[in-house]
Image (spheres, rainbow, N blue to C red):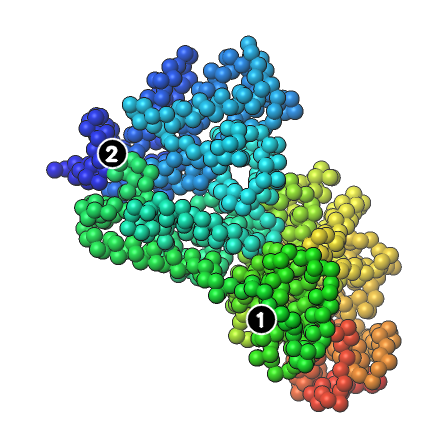
Amino acid sequence: MSHFSKQIQFLTTHSSYAARWLNARPEWVNWLELHAGQKVDPVGIQALLGECAVLAASNGCDEALLMSHLRLARQKLMLWLAFRDLNGLASLDEVMRGMSQFAQAVIALCIDFIRAEQKSRFGLPWSVVRHSEIPLMVVGMGKLGGYELNLSSDIDLIFLYECDGQTQNGPHSLSHQEWFTRMGKRLIKLLAEHTEDGFVFRVDMRLRPNGDSGPLVCSLPMLEEYLMVQGREWERYAWIKGRLIAPAPNSADFAYCEKQLDQLIRPFVYRRHLDYGVIASIRDLHAQIQIEAEKKSSHHHGRSQDIKLGRGGIREIEFLAQMFQLMRGGTDPRFRVRPTLEVLDLIAERGLLPRDAVLALKAAYVFLRRLEHRIQVWEDQQTHYLPEDAAARMRLANAMSGPNATEGDSTFLQALEQHQTAVSALFEEAFVLEDKARLELAPLVAHWSPDPVLFPEGFKRWELWLDSARQKHLPEKSRLIIFNLLNKATEYLQANEVNSQAADITILRLFDLLESISRRNAYLAILAEYPKALLNVLALLKSSQWGAAYLSGHPYLLDYLLHSRAEQLLIDEPKRYWYEVKENLDMRLDDAQSNGEGSEQSLDILRVTHHTETFITLLADLGIGIERGLSVEQVSDHLSALADLILQATFEHVWPSVAQKFGLSSSLPPFAIISYGKLGGKELGYASDLDLVFLYQSEGAGYADQEIYAFLAKRMIHCLTAYTAAGTLFEIDTRLRPNGSAGFLVTNADAFRKYQLREGDNSAWVWEHQALTRARCSAGSPVVGAYFEKVRSEVLRQQRNQEILRAEIVDMRMKVHAGHPNPTVQFDLKHDAGGMVDIEFIVQFLVLAFAHRHEQLVGNLGNIALLRIAGNIGLIDEDLAIKVGDAYRLLRARQHRLRLDGAEKIRVTLESEPNLIQARTSVLQLWRNVFKVPID
């Protein structure tokens, strides 16, 4: 027996359906031999449908003959796929995608046939707005939408059309509704009617608006109204897979129709925030499906026999994947993909589930779908039940093993049980199926309140809350969630917090948070579904007043208190981390622009990204989710990298509209954003403003360029400072540009050089050269950035009269000191004598006075590194340089801590801070050594 004969035998042994058709059509065996080694792809499918296409396009085509040809083509495809699948020649993706592509091709062919016939009688539906024909829009739902059809799937379809009206240019006229209804009915007949040759596909239309009681076809306005008024939670789940399959993707109408449909479906399916409310919704839907499955399988030996709806079955994997899609698809466009395996890959990539868990889900999905195909191909029946007799199960075991292996029934059932158990466990964990794992929503005991002794201020706040109108108007479920969260929080703090004052403050901050989200069910759902997150919330609220206020202002950040994912990657691989953040941000901005969501949505995306990454840095700073918190230098590095990223993204996002306005190329122009101050020195804090200067390169007089780049800078500043629903980004200060507020907003790079080098009447002051020591290119053109760095080096390396320089810097220091008076006895860490400003002025003097002899001082390395260099080359005492560097680090750390605690002024009482006294003494000593005068 030849190899092919053995393969045919294996096919017919494991598919009585295939045996029947090959007996009836023995010539198909030769056809199979020719195609056995060919992958089932669109080219092969078109060849298979070649005769059907010719027949459908012929004048006076007999419908019954076309139906016969279509059915026979379907049987040949089934045999082709079954042969390759059972003999181990085809991947799961080839089988599912092949069936899906065939369905799409057949639907397109049938629509063309029906359209030609109806056109001759009634004309065509016509858009008076677009002055073109209105096509039937067919949406493939479920497995068809996800390119996941199995070997005996029905197809879930929804028929749509653009708008109502009357057909035109025919002997008779019909309403668009009637025209498309006739087309829909005939399409279903062509596909689903049983003849002696079988059927093409069973068609299920129950997912359309109002199901079986609704019209067969509906207009887009009708669909929009239905989704807004009546759309149910399970329909959000169903529409995830919805994919426009007609008109054909290569047609002129496809892009327009797809965009029109997407604008209706996307806001219905995906929320603009992380949607944790879907967990309870899908959990309820799963419970309903379980009940139905129990009824259907009552004559089987338990529901586990159902590999689709049973415990650990295909539906649980799909539900789990789609939970993440519904939850995150509104904020991350990548989650809008349709195939389940692609969603699982994305879940692993984003760290939402452990990689081992995702691998287990994928392995189970492939196993169960292959098993499903072998069950169905036996008799071409849409069934998902394991056969109960031993012989049939042994046959399935052999079919799963393939023609070149043997596997016993027990081994096969053991593998099935392992996959089902793994899926069931992961499903139960993801959907918090155990009631005890979720927040208990029982009413509290009568007259419960926080302990007035342990939580005196919290008790007062509780009394006010009970009497408030806000509390009384809340839904009962929201009220129960809030009450039980407060109960859990007080119990935890009472048992674990030694400092009662800190515990009381933490409860007050929790009240602020709960009040801010009390009317937002999606955020309450996070804490109700994952009460363990409350511990991380309390850790944040206890550690930082600023962080508590930040979370209350941006409650969607609660998601990042559920799992520690990003913080460790941020620390371990910052370059990769920021690359991925930028990539995701660009994708979301492009997505918003391509779907016409307007500039405000883009501004919100920028803000949400900045808030999210700031919060992740804050969590790492406080040591929440990681073993050890960040140093203040690490925090500033991350915040500075984030600001650079936002500036670059804003530049790239704004320029195309500016270029369009002025008729220029969309390629990024020679324009750079130079940062000074905190951002320039990579010492940015959580709420720092940005000191920016805009440079551009231009040949000639450049007045037109001045106008263009000024417009670009203004647009950028608007994007960065405008207050939207998502908040704001930064305060921007541009007064460090040449001539300050009196100068142009943007500066030609050559003019900037002349200004800084004092080559003309209009020249820079010493304080501007001081500022230049902490300046760098943060975003924009690398060419202009490199030019700036060259100019900066040239300016800093100029030889200067040290006595004049010393006097000017001391004079400037006195002005700064006078501008920040301190009437208290406390020490101002930044502005008082011996504080951070003194250290910065010392370093600036050393750079400007000696960089012409010591090139290593030119680098924008930070104050601590520059002090060490100055000490190493003998400009200052080496030991004192180290002490002052340590003092700067200590002062910054204390400033940072005070800011986190919400302090308005960064002042401390020195008597209780011996380390600060010593640090200040070292700074004052170095000041005297460098400037020859006391700062006091």
Left or right of residue 821: residue 409: left
Taking the view exactly as shown, the residue that stands out farthest to the left is 1
Left or right of residue 87: residue 900: right
Q: Secondary structure at mark 1?
A: helix
Q: Locate residue 865: give its quadrant.
A: bottom right
Which residue is painted at 33% across and 21% down in the image?
Answer: 68
Q: Is the residue marked by circle 2 packed among few (<14), some (14-19), or many (20+) residues within 10 Å?
A: many
Q: What amino acid is found at the position of numbered circle 1 in the picture?
A: Lys
Q: Secondary structure at mark 2?
A: helix
Left or right of residue 483: residue 305: left
Badge number at residue 733: none
Which residue is painted at 33% across and 46% down in the image?
Answer: 297
- Across the whole image, how many numbered discs are drawn on residues? 2
Q: CA distance from mark 1 to mark 2?
A: 61 Å
Which residue is painted at 53% across and 68% down in the image?
Answer: 532
Along the polypeptide, which appears first: circle 1 or circle 2? 2
Taking the view exactly as shown, the residue that stands out farthest to the front is 446
Q: Which residue in the protein does label 1 denote?
A: 488
Q: Locate residue 51: give its quadrant.
A: top left
Look at the numbered discs 1 and 2 and tell me whether their residues touch, using CB distance below 8 Å: no
Which residue is painted at 27% across and 33% down in the image?
Answer: 79
Q: Which residue in the protein does label 2 denote?
A: 17
Instruction: Tell me the quarter of the image containing the C terminus.
Output: bottom right
The image position of residue 369, as x and y in percent, is 34, 46
The image position of residue 747, as x and y in percent, is 78, 54
The image position of residue 652, as x and y in percent, is 65, 49
The image position of residue 72, as x and y in percent, is 30, 25
**In the picture shown, does residue 910 fall above or below 392?**
below
